[in-house]
Every structure is written in structure tokens, then in C-alpha cells.
Image (spheres, helix red, strand yellow):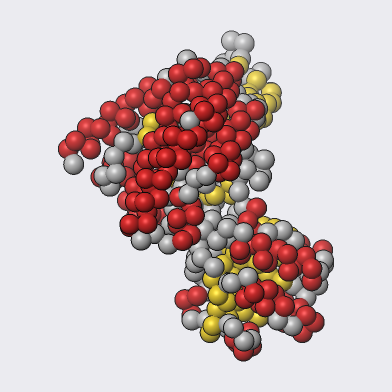
Amino acid sequence: MEDVSKLMRKIGVAARAAAAELAFAPAEAKQAALEAAARAVEARQAEIIAANAQDMAFGAAKGLSPAMMDRLTLDAGRIAGIVDGLRAIAAQPDPVGRVLAEWDQPTGLHIQRVATPLGVIGVIYESRPNVTADAGALCLKAGNAVILRGGSESFHSSTAIHGCMVEGLRAAGLPEAAIQLVPTRDRAAVSAMLQAVEFIDVIVPRGGKGLVGLVQAEARVPVFAHLEGICHVYADGDADLEKARRVVLNAKTRRTGICGSAECLLIDRAFYAKHGAVLIEDLLAAGVEVRAEGELAQIPGTVSAQPDDFGREFLDMIIAAKLVDGVDGAIAHIRRYGSSHTESILTENDATAARFFQRLDSAIMMRNASTQFADGGEFGMGAEIGIATGKMHARGPVGAEQLTSFKYLVTGDGTCRA
């Protein structure tokens, strides 16, 4: 424990020093670092895939679920996605130094509110090794130093990707401590990060309910909370049938292990009267286990839902389903069981969609679109550090712009207060 404490203190001191330099690093240097990192990931693809094979073997031995193994997997396509994300973030406008507001006071003062880095960000994540690149890149773009603590499952993959990020920093002449990866699987490192108020300005947890709950319970550092992705799709009576069929299948089955995967299907009784069990039958045909309530449980192939199936993040080929009385029934259900992540309404009725958007307050509200779009890359942010489901500072996909704070620059001319 003592060794981990010393290690984390050393990492914290280095991060704080790096953050001080990054606060005024030229936009061109940050862009160059990310472009060089992207080239390094491309060049070292075989090395990264070999490292990932070690992690996959570790994950299999640990008994990870298929969804978690999917999160852990890296192949040529996903590495290309990492490269594209790095280049997209590199190409974005620099968020630091933006003038957010500007005005003059009758006293003669000129006041500007200007975007500044947060400082040092700690990211604690499970399974997904691509977070190493996404979080590192976004923090750097926003002028922050970052301390990354990946899951034990992704240790080798994250280490290989981190090496590419450091190569980019070195090429651009930026401090290598700007992006640090905790080089141990010891859980004591997580506790040390959560208590490191002198070194870390904010913690971002990315993982399951257990990890996020631990972070929220133990952290003395402010947290950007990303709780569960209990995402709902509501098929309204005025939904277009073919759109609804496409969206529901995609929202559940495209990738079941991501936080934007639909976990509950709500069907308006008016839709059911008009179209029958088609949405349920599509899911069953695709191999989804449908845990249904009420009339829907009479559909052949469904399983009777248990009370705890609603408000549950399955991250698997499982979905809860029930009939509701119109949009107000859907709203009432989501208010009770949702996690404030992402909700989608399928309807052609503008007034109904407006009511759904207005009366629910999840971080992301969608209409006639799959919840799988709940992703910073799909929002044009290049990538994301997480989906914040709280209401303080950042909400929804957290990109580079959301990783800034601000300060006031006040200019006078020998101005004195009366």
C-alpha cells in the first residue's frame, strides 16, 4: 500500500506540473501531438492487437460476459476508429481561450469570460482500452493533464495505446506527464486517486454501477458521474411502423455492451392495437430475450418480466418490455425507472414529441433515432470521455469543450470603485 501511495503521489506531482504548462500550450502543439499519436497507433497496430490478445485471454479466464468481452476487443476496424477519433479531436477548434461572453460596465471596466482548462483530470475506467486514447486526447485538447487508471482486464492494451500517446507528446515537445497511465492493477491506486484533492481537480468514472457507486461513495474529488445507461425507446401510437422497426432493432442489437443500448421498450397501447406484436417479434427473431409484462407476456417466445427487470442495465441481448397508456404513461415509467441517460420517442406527431422532450430531463432526448447514437463521436465531438448523467457542469457526451472551466479577465484604465 505504501508503495502505491508513493507511486500515486509521484504521478500526481508530475501531472500538476504538466497541467501548468498545458494551460498555455499553443493550439498547434496540441494538434501536432494528437496527429503524431494517431500515426503511432497506425504504425503499432500489430503490437496493440498482440497486447489485446493477452487481455482477451485474461478476460476469458476471469469469466467476463460476452458483452464485456466485446467492450474489451480490439481489431483492425476498432483501431482505425481510434485513429479517426484522434485525428477528429486534433482537427477541432481549440476550446481554450474562447471568449464566452464580453461586456462593458458603466464604471469603465471591460469584462471577458474566457474558457480555461480544468487542470488535472483523473479517469477511472473498465474494460474498454479505446478510452485510453479518447480520454487522453480530449483532456490534452482542453489543456488538461490526465491520470488514466484502466481496468485490470485492459491492462496490456491500454499500456500499448498509452505508449502511442506519449510518443505524440514527445514529438510535439509537450510534457510526457500530460497523459499518464497508472502502471499497476492494484486497486489501492483507485482509492488514492479518489482522495487526491491536492493533485486531481475532477474524477471521471467510466464503467458499471459498481465502479460508479464506489467512486461516488469514496471520492473527495469532484466527480462527473456517468451512472447506468438505462435507455428507453417509446413507440407512440403515431409512430411510423417501418421507422419504428428499424430503430428498435438497432437500439437493442447493434452493440449490446455499450451504455447507449436500449434496455426497455415501451409500447403505446394505440400502437399495439394498430400493429400488434411486430416490434416484439422482430426482437425475438433477432435472438433477443424479451422480458415482457402484462399482455406482452402472452406473446409466444417472451419471458415474464420480474419487477427488477425494469430499471436494469442488461448490457446483453435482453430487453424489458411493457405496454403504456400514451406518452404520459411512458413519461411516468421513465421518471420512475430511468437513469437520466438517453430516451427515444418514435412518433410522427410533433406535439407528442414536444411533450416527451419537455417533460423528461435525461441528458439526451431523441426522436425517431436509435439510442446507439448516444456517443460523443456521433455528436461530432471526435470522441467522448463519458456520458455525464448528473446536472452539474457537464451533461451528456463530455468532449473537449466540456472539459474546460472559465475565468474573468477584467480591464480598466486606472479605474477605481466609488
Residue occupying the point 54% across, 71% down: 318
Whether residue 34 is visible here, answered yes or no, is no
For the N terminus, which image quadrant?
top left
Image quadrant assignment for residue 326: bottom right
Left/right of residue 326 with respect to residue 170 in the rendered view = right
Q: Position of residue 218 (x, y in %)?
A: 32, 51
Query: In the displayed structure, would residue 357 be above or below residue 156?
Result: below
| Residue sticking out furthest to the top | 414
Q: Position of residue 311 (x, y in %)?
A: 51, 70
Left/right of residue 185 with respect to residue 413 in the rendered view = left
Q: Position of residue 403 (x, y in %)?
A: 53, 36
For the C terminus, which image quadrant?
top right
Q: Position of residue 362 (x, y in %)?
A: 60, 58
| Residue sticking out furthest to the left | 2
Left/right of residue 1 with respect to residue 356 in the rendered view = left
Residue occupying the point 58% across, 38% down: 80
Given residues 86 and 107, the one toward you in this image is 86
Whether residue 307 is visible here, answered yes or no, is yes
Residue occupying the point 58% across, 43% down: 77
Query: In the displayed structure, would residue 310 be above or below residue 168?
Result: below
Given residues 248 and 398, the one toward you in this image is 248
Query: In the displayed structure, would residue 18 be above or below residue 88?
Result: above
Residue occupying the point 66% across, 61% down: 250
Given residues 267 and 46, the one toward you in this image is 46
